Amino acid sequence: MTRYAFEFSEQTRLPVIIRPTTRVCHSSGIVTFGPLPDKRNPIEFTKDPARYVPIPSNARRMRKELTERYAEAARLLQESEFFPRTGDGKKGILASGVSYAYAAQVIDDLGLRDRVTLQQIGAYPIPDKVLAEFLQAVESVLVVEELTPFVEDWVSLAAFRQRRQIPVYGKHSGHLPVEYEYSPDLVEDAMRDYLGLEKRDRSAVAVPELPSRPPVLCPGCPHRASFYLARRAFGKKTIYCNDIGCYTLGYGQPLHACDVLLCMGSSISQASGIARLTGRRTVAYIGDSTFFHSGFPALANAVQAADNITVVILDNYVAAMTGFQPSLTTHDGEGRPAAHGGSHAPDAATPRFSIEDAVRGLGVTEVYSVDPYDEDSALAAFRKARKGTGVNVVVCHSPCAVNERRRRKGQRRATFIIDRERCNACTLCVRMLGCPGILVTDGEYAIDQELCDGCALCAYVCKQKAIVQATERKESV
Amino acid sequence: MIDGRHSQSGWRIVLSGTGGQGVLTAARLLCDCLAERGHNVVSGQLHGMAQRGGSVHSSVMIDSGISPVMGTGRADYVLGLEPVETTRALPLMSSRTVVYMNTAPIIPFVIGQQTVLGDGEAKYPAVDQLVASIRAVTKQVFPLDATRLARECGSGRAVNMIMLGCLLGSEALPCTADDFWNSAAGRIPKGLVETNARAFMSGAKAGRRLRFAAEGRV
């Protein structure tokens, strides 16, 4: 499909969106590779301003061309392989996205091929001919698609235009919900209802109550240290605006590092707005990649407006949440920046990106550069920032713990253990940090030696000095 | 013969565990091996943030259709790498399902945290009770301490290989334990091959033993 999309885009001069939903992205199947096309690099740019500059005089012409190309696109799609129809029953089912796989599977599992005609809608614009032929073949339609009833409304309209009285079931009829991802069970139930089959009894299976496993910041995550120290300096009442990344996991117990969140880059502008309206200094947390993506405009704006905000940039040298893609501060451990797909590999002459220089360039004069695992210095910087006026920035540099482990290839730092003699079960380490490596069983505190990353933050927090480095790494708990 | 298969064609397998146990790696090795042998394989992963300690469930469907997600009661085999996570897969089981489950728990840290913070009463259920709740659905449950076996083989992290060994050693799939290992060995990082080989063979032995015991009983 992706290959077709490229060819289709070339042919129609239209942008094509491949739209994989969550479930598609978390599934795999067999892909047969075709031949790769000849490389065409370097591509010649042929000047054609009438095509590439949409000023009004060109745009008027382009709008008309677009309508024509759109009709051409529908014509081309009609001949494509994305609208297969199977089965020959009078009960029609129209399905798109991963729901098509569920519907096809239910038809297979229940042996419904002779009762149902299944039409896949695999691309947009939906060719008129596809719907016309489908509507001719069936006496009623059930539309199975996730979220907005898009295909459902489209087929109702197509039936109306054909003067065809035909019942269309789906979300409007209450067979299927508008909300959430679908499942094979949900689709099966709707299909059973639609086909007048007996409901499936699922009451036989009783699942006992099970503890949940919510995602948390990893053991050794430097964000935990930054959040803990910033909160010690700024206190409970300060409003913390957070952003998009692993550090969103600062939400809730026990770090409480996320009172407000909207979208990429929202932390700084929301902090500005809240500071102006409440008259109190607010904190914005933003990671390195998100800051490079959309932090600059809001920060420049805050500087010009002299907003009372502290921006904490959590620089872990990588876009960790989405799978360790390089960011501008990613480096190879020897000072060389990582490759970013440019025309030549980075070398000693390639400048390393400096967040501090960048924010100074935007006009921030009060900039602190800290390592959150140098806890006392970082805490001192946060305290100074709290007392500052206008915009100040604290940059917390420390590598993503998981990425570091991958780089160290299994070589792990010495872990920490709890000295039961000294531990008085004061609960501070658990109450303050929420590290999954610290276990509490029947009032006894222990550190999971397989999870512990050796970051030593808990040892810093412990007032009893009960958390100490293990003399040798133990293989297991 | 232990056969978890339902009347439908093909084999449907669920692997369940927690982040870091190697559920996704195990599923991938299984898919690659069967795809190489000409089977049609579809796989789906249900995980929030696998790196971050959450539940990780994966389905492997062999020659059984196009859906990457399994419906209620349609699992032929369940490989449970952790007791609570095995029990979480209960809705996918039926009276025909064969379940190999590790009895060594990984206690979610939230339990301790909730106790300390006083904001919840979550408890880790008794493993016996978890096994019993699965046994109420299917009699073909085979509990084993896979974590101990894995440690004996050199690493507590090789639980996924023990469990894969159980499944393939029981001759449940259209490929033998040897076929699988020949395919998987080349995909495992060199430094880990030896430990994983030991774990897989140990699991295969356990799987065969469980199968013979069950056949003797039947």
Image (cartoon, rainbow, N blue to C red):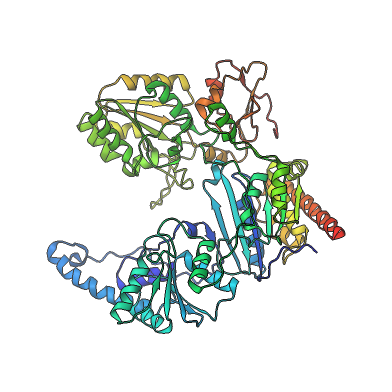
Q: Quadrant for residue A439, please give it.
A: top right
Q: Quadrant for residue B120, please give it.
A: top right
Outermost residue toward the right?
Answer: B216
The C terminus of chain A, quarter of image: top right
The answer to whether residue A125 is seen in the rendering is no
Residue A278 coordinates in the image, percent (x, y):
25, 28
From the viewer's side, name the closer residue of B32 and A437. A437
From the viewer's side, name the closer residue of B3 and A194. A194
| Residue at (20, 31) in percent of width and height | A305
Q: Viewed as shown, does residue A296 lie left or right of A436?
A: left
From the viewer's side, name the closer residue of B40 and A316. B40
Q: In the image, is residue B159 above or below residue B8?
A: above
Q: Quadrant for residue A476, please give it.
A: top right
| Residue at (71, 42) in percent of width and height | B127
The answer to whether residue A330 is seen in the rendering is yes
Residue B95 coordinates in the image, percent (x, y):
70, 60
Residue B91 coordinates in the image, percent (x, y):
61, 55
Outermost residue toward the left?
Answer: A57
The N terminus of chain A, quarter of image: bottom left
Residue A239 coordinates in the image, percent (x, y):
34, 29
Q: Viewed as shown, does residue A188 lie left or right of A229?
A: right
